[in-house]
Amino acid sequence: MEYRDNSILIEAKEVFNKLGNENLVIIDCDVSELYQRAHIKGAITLPVHHYIKQSGYEKSAIEYPHIMNKTEFEELVNMLNINSKSEIIAYDNSGNLYSSRFWWCLNYFGLRNVKILNGGWKEWLHYDYPIDSGFNYAFKKTSTPNLAKSDIKIKQNENYICKLDDLKKLINDPNSVILDTRNIDEYTGSNSRGNKRVGHVPGSVNIEWLEFIDENNNNKFKSQNEIESILNKQNITYEKQIATYWQGGIRAAHVFVVLKLIGYKNIKVYDASMGEYANLENTELEI
């Protein structure tokens, strides 16, 4: 399937043909329990929470809503044994949701040598390509692995991320779109997701992230034309500055990838999303 930007995705057949390549790093971005049950042959699992959030997130998503810091990410890169020659392929069994999050995180920190397996696990199984089960590498949550320092230089790309003050400036800006990627119950406030306050950012447009997934084609991304049609109905056009958000920035990162695929340029993810916004007292909310 062709998109304006064909550098982001890779198809299952291409991945199969690369199996065994020295620099190939396949990363299963779902929770480790699913990885242990079954995964692509040679793949590894993430040794951290698959949202790639800052230390403390698992204890309190509201208090620690941000992407992990530079030092934490450097440690993750070392644990995954990623270097400048690595060819990284990310996948999941969740409609490309977590692999898109991982892709966005790597690109935010300056790593460009990563692709998303379009359709992920479902697409891989569809072709009956080889799989493994259990852990197949040295990482254990109860031990500290010996880390070889990566030669990759980590540098945050602020063009990928929207902070709270940035988001506030976009409210009522006719040249901007704030895109709420949650479901309609979250958007209207009938589902609080545990937040202190409910609703959505004033003027935000709601398109649930699942709208961009083709459930009849192994959860691959919809086509360029289908995605454009969805966006055009909401007047979300190429020239506008777009900020995506969710409860925690995960579905927002997925839609960021969708927009990148079809050639949009001015996109940022409000990574802290409603985990931050709806738990502050001085932020505007609509219901």
Image (cartoon, grey):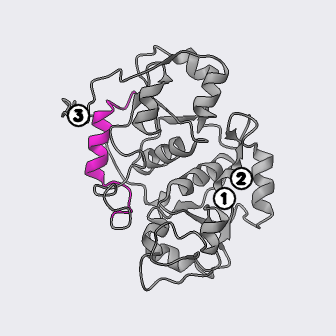
Residue at position x 61%, y 21% in the image? 14
- Quadrant of residue 116 within the rendered picture: top right
Mark 1, residues whose alpha carbon is within 10 Å: few (<14), some, or many (≥20)? some
Cα gap from disc 3 to disc 2, whole angstroms: 40 Å
* Left or right of 199 in this view: 231: right
- Quick check: 259 left or right of 109? right
Mark before the other along the chain sequence, 3 or 2? 3
Q: Which amino acid lies under the numbered mark 3 shown in the image of this protein?
A: Lys
In the structure shown, which secondary structural element does the residue marked by tag 2 occupy? helix
Q: Nearer the viewer, residue 169 or 146?
A: 146
- Proximity of marks 2 and 1: CB atoms separated by less than 8 Å: yes
Report crowding for label 3: few under 14, some 14 to 19, many 20 or more residues within 10 A (C-alpha): some
Mark carried by residue 149: 3
Q: Is residue 48 visible?
A: yes
Q: Position of residue 230 (x, y in %)?
A: 77, 57
| Mark 1 residue type | Glu
Residue bearing mark 2: 211
Does 234 appear above or below 118?
Answer: below
